[in-house]
Amino acid sequence: MLSDYLAHDAIGLAELVRTRQASARELLDIAISRTEAVNPAINAIVLKDYDAARHRASRDDASRANGADPSDSTSAQAALAGVPYLIKDLGAPIAGLRMAMGSRHYRHFIPTEDAPVVTLSKAAGLNIFAKTSTSELGQMPYTEPELFGACRNPWNLDHTPGGSSGGAAAAVAAGIVPLAHASDGGGSIRIPASCCGLFGLKPSRARVPRVAPPGAGDLGVDHAVSRSVRDSALLLDLLSGNAQRPLGAPGTFLGASREPCKPLNIAYVTEPMLAPVLSADSRAALDDAAQLAMSLGHNIEPVSLGIDFATVRHAFLMLWSVTAEELVLNADRITGRKPSRSEFEISTWAMAHMGRKLGERGLPSALEEQRRITARLTDLLNRYDVVLCATLAAPPIKIGEMHPTSAERMQMRAVSALPIEALMRKLLTEASNKAFAWAGCTELFNLTGQPAMSVPLYWNARGLPVGVQFAAREGGEATLLRLAAQLETARPWFDKRPPLMQARS
């Protein structure tokens, strides 16, 4: 039965349940069995809620046996009924379940209400049975929280699955579930999708309702990482208000993924953005994607974005640090407990103090810079349908490669205790250089709010995935999904399985 489970995406599994070829309980039992088999190796799951999920699955199966059907083949509502699902342990509270967010301070925090994305996922029929690992408060582009330990990439356990939705991507790549909830405030859907050979779409700003109020600059969005394009498209329908419309109807995202993709004018960008340079692997992946797109009839035009990336860096870091301040230094507003230094990783603690010190004067100018950057990219995307650029500047890094050095940790402790602005700015620059050297290609589209996706078209000589990124004008998810489905047909990736998945199938 496991081989059948792995052969289907979420839509396929839901169809098995709807047509009674499999029960929701059977699918859940396979997902749990798969979790127990592979999670010791990848450390993707940080909280299990098996008993409640089993109860839901058995209840729904009993309803079907009595003639009720929670799904409707003509409507998107509950279209994924019976499909096992995972929620990222960050920013998506589930009433009654701990939400640690990778942090010692939050490890006992139990929300009392579901987040909108959780409510909508449940309404879609998805059966949430566990929560996935994230970097502490989503701060890092890799998933190695001190609280839970490193999450590992199924393609090579010595490498990161990316972050901050690394647990979600590792779980999907390892065959635990065909898609999983993820969120993206600086690349946290697209980065792990690239690292794990998955499809990852970051929707337009505010496309999916979120817990209010949003962070500084409204950078974050919720959606998922998936093995198929159509799963991502249907889930976006279910999360964004199309649940009552006919399944796959014109004007829906699933409908768009089924439509032919017209020839597009694609701006081909090889600039490394916030990274100093693109690696040979990232450049090869880009060139390969450009050649594939041209072979499919698209017009590829090399373009410079004409953006001052020093300005992008400044605006993003200012907004990021102010958001960290809210989650760390004002954590008592959420948990009712005063935060202490011992409860946070030193890099997170230092970032929060930088937000407090620099944000008061720097936030207004950062927001103004965000508006200017958005206007510049909007103008470009009024002339092109899509931008093609790198998702990451290099393939997945090794576990531990980006941890702060002893000297960097000492500096972080110093600026937290003695908040001298000049020293803070120097440390912020040095620390961000390290992260952006690898993961500096995604933040731009969080600042501007445009939709962007990472598509798994390329694996390097060492067998590691290297995704490529496409972005469209605001509200242009349908364009991206048409293109993604076309690329998926031309260069199928669904049956590409990492060594861990093959060994334990």
Image (cartoon, grey):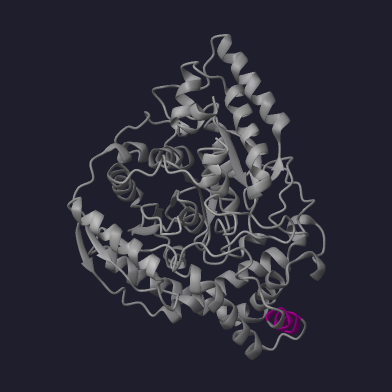
Residue in the picture at 60% in, 17% down? 61
Q: Give the number of callouts.
A: 0
The answer to whether residue 454 is magenta is no
Residue 87 lies left or right of residue 52; in this view the side is left
Question: For residue 485, which quarter of the picture?
Answer: top left
Is residue 87 placed above or below 141 in the rendered structure?
above
Q: Position of residue 238 (x, y in %)?
A: 46, 37
Residue 167 lies left or right of residue 3; in this view the side is right
Residue 299 lies left or right of residue 435; in this view the side is left
Q: Position of residue 323 (x, y in %)?
A: 62, 67
Please provide the residue range marked out in magenta: 408-416
Residue 44, visible in the rendered structure: no
Is residue 292 placed above or below 115 in the rendered structure?
below
Viewer-nearest residue: 73 or 168 = 168
Q: Position of residue 341 (x, y in %)?
A: 80, 70
Viewer-nearest residue: 1 or 184 = 1
The answer to whether residue 412 is magenta is yes
Is residue 62 placed above or below 413 in the rendered structure?
above
Is residue 5 placed above or below 283 in the rendered structure?
above
Residue 55, visible in the rendered structure: yes
The quarter of the image holding the N terminus is top right
Most frequent secondary structure within the magenta stretch: helix
Question: For residue 216, which quarter of the picture?
Answer: bottom right
Residue in the picture at 31% in, 77% down? 306
Q: Position of residue 321 (x, y in %)?
A: 61, 72
Most extreme residue toward the top is 66
The quarter of the image holding the C terminus is top right
